[in-house]
Each structure stands twice: as C-alpha cells, then as structure tokens.
C-alpha cells in the first residue's frame, strides 16, 4: 500500500515546489520593478512613462500579493514607493496615451489632457487631439499649457453642472406652478386635481381619494348600523309602500336598519322588507 501512495505524494510535492517557484519568480519580478521605480524616481519628469508601466503591471498582475501585501495601496505605503493618487495618475496616462505622445507632452500636460478628454462630451482621445492639433479655448493642443488645459476642463465641468441644475430648476418651478394652480382651482370649487396638471408639472402629489373621506370616531358596529339606517332610508324613499301594507306587515315588515354584514356570524337570510 505504501508503494501505491508514493506517486501521489511525489505529484503533490512537485505541485508544491512549482507553486513556490512561481511565487518566488513573481516576487523577484516585483522586486525588479520596485528597483526600476527607485532608479527612475529622480528622473520622473523624463521617465514617468516607465514608472507608470511598472506600476500598471504591479496593479493589474496583482504582484503585490507575492510580496505579502493585501492591496496595491498597501504596497505603495509600506514600501514608500509613491502616493496612491500619483500612482493612479501615472497609470491613467499609460492607459490613455501612447508613449511617444506622452513623452512629447510631459507628465503634467499628459495628465491634464487625459482629464480634459474625459470631461468633453465628444468621443476623443489624447492621441487624436494632439494629432489634429485641436483648438482648446482658442489655443492649439500642442501649444496650450497644462494650466490652460486644467482651466478648460474646469470650465467644461462647471457648464455641465449649470446645465444640469437649470433643467432641475425648471422642473421644480413647473411643479410649484402646477400645485399653485391646483390650490386656486380647489378654492373655487374644483373637486379633483387635474391629471394633466400633475403630468405637466411632474409634481409629487400623494395618491389619495378626492375629497378625502371624513374620519369617524364611532366603533365598527356603530358605523355599520349607521350605514344600514342610511341604506334603509334610501330604500324607503325609492320604494314607498301603501299604508295598508305597512299596517299589515307591522313592525317586522320594516327594514331592520342593519347592514347585512353588521352581525358577524348571523346565519339568517337578509330581510326584504316584507313577510314571505
């Protein structure tokens, strides 16, 4: 039996050794990337793209796990590589901008150009903007500064917020006007709010019966009895009887004045107002 288990044990040992080798290989690669970043940090103005590519590989390949870090941010903090925001900005440049264009523009202008293209409603990229030398706030893309791009982006964002706020303000004003008109109509005898006004003003009026039913302080049996009396009175007005019939029927011929369901559990049939 021991000889039969030997191949399985060897296979498990081989798998474990391969896993340790892979982890060591990833750890070595992570150390190489960190060393590259350290060498390039002094020259980050020129070598920022290499740093961004190394950071991107560390993040997307999850190589920080091989070094015992729970997250990419934890690696940056514990190893004092870069600030998390700065690292994400460099990765954004690598994701959106080709190397030759990014090196031509520089780190700051490349980042601002990425942010500007993300803020514009048009479908464009940093490469297409530079290739077409798009005019941004009256200045060609190749000539505008990083500060000019930042101002243009902030203006676009402010305009979009203003437009969004004006649309919401118009809807609110329409709702207020519709509610004021409904109140004016109710004061002059209108019974129900207009559905057209609700839809036009998009007002958030609660759905309720119009006019709302008056609350009664009576108990359920008294309310049922009162309802029965009203129904009985309406029946007498609708079907008046001759005096002789009333005399012949006596007290039992009168409608009892109770709602048919007032006495819960009653088995006798509903009276019709005459003796059978």
Image (cartoon, rainbow, N blue to C red):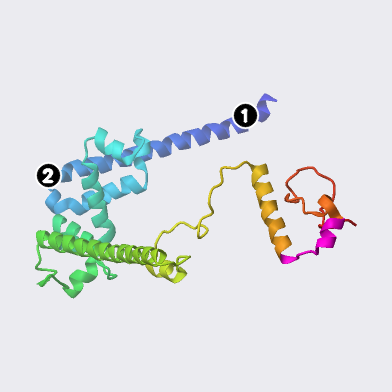
Give the answer, above or below, for where 20 lies relative to 36: above
Q: In which quadrant of the rendered image does the C terminus lie?
A: bottom right
Residue 263 spot, x, y in % from top left: 75, 44
User: With 229 as the anchor, is 124 left or right in this view?
Assistant: left
User: With 144 as the anchor, is 183 left or right in this view?
Assistant: right
Q: In which quadrant of the rendered image does the N terminus lie?
A: top right
Seen at 77% across and 54% down, the residue is 255
Question: Would you call the spot at circle 2 few (<14 residues within 10 Å), some (14-19), or many (20 or more)?
Answer: few
State the image quarter where residue 221 is shown.
top right
Q: Which residue is mark 1?
A: 6
Question: Would you call the spot at circle 1 few (<14 residues within 10 Å), some (14-19), or many (20 or more)?
Answer: few
Q: Nearer the viewer, mark 1 or mark 2?
A: 2
Residue 233 spot, x, y in % from top left: 69, 58
The magenta region covers 238-248
State the image quarter where residue 84 is shown.
top left
- Any part of residue 98 in sight: no
Instruction: Specify the principal SS of the magenta part.
Output: helix
What separation in Å lies between label 1 and label 2 (alpha carbons)? 55 Å
């Amino acid at each position: 039996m021991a000889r039969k288990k030997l191949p399985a044990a060897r296979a498990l040992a081989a798998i474990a050794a391969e896993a340790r080798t892979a982890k060591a290989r990833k750890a070595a690669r992570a150390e190489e990337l960190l060393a590259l970043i350290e060498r390039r940090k002094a020259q980050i103005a020129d070598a920022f793209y290499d740093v961004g590519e190394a950071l991107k590989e560390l993040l997307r390949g999850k190589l920080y796990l091989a070094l015992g870090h729970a997250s990419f941010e934890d690696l940056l903090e514990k190893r004092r590589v870069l600030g998390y925001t700065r690292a994400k900005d460099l990765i954004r440049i690598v994701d959106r901008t080709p190397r030759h264009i990014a090196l031509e523009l520089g780190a700051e202008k490349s980042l601002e150009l990425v942010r500007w293209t993300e803020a514009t409603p048009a479908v464009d990229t940093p490469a297409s903007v530079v290739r077409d030398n798009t005019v941004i706030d009256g200045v060609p893309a190749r000539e505008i500064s990083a500060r000019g791009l930042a101002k243009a982006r902030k203006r676009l964002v402010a305009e979009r917020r203003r437009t969004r706020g004006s649309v919401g303000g118009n809807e609110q004003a329409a709702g207020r006007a519709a509610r004021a008109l409904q109140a004016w109509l109710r004061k002059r005898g209108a019974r129900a709010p207009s559905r057209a006004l609700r839809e036009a003003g998009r007002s958030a009026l609660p759905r309720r019966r119009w006019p709302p039913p008056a609350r009664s302080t009576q108990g359920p049996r008294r309310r049922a009895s009162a309802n029965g009396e009203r129904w009985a009175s309406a029946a007498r007005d609708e079907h008046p009887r001759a005096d002789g019939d009333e005399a012949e029927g006596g007290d039992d011929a009168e409608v009892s004045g109770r709602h048919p369901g007032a006495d819960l559990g009653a088995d006798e049939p509903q009276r019709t107002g005459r003796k059978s």
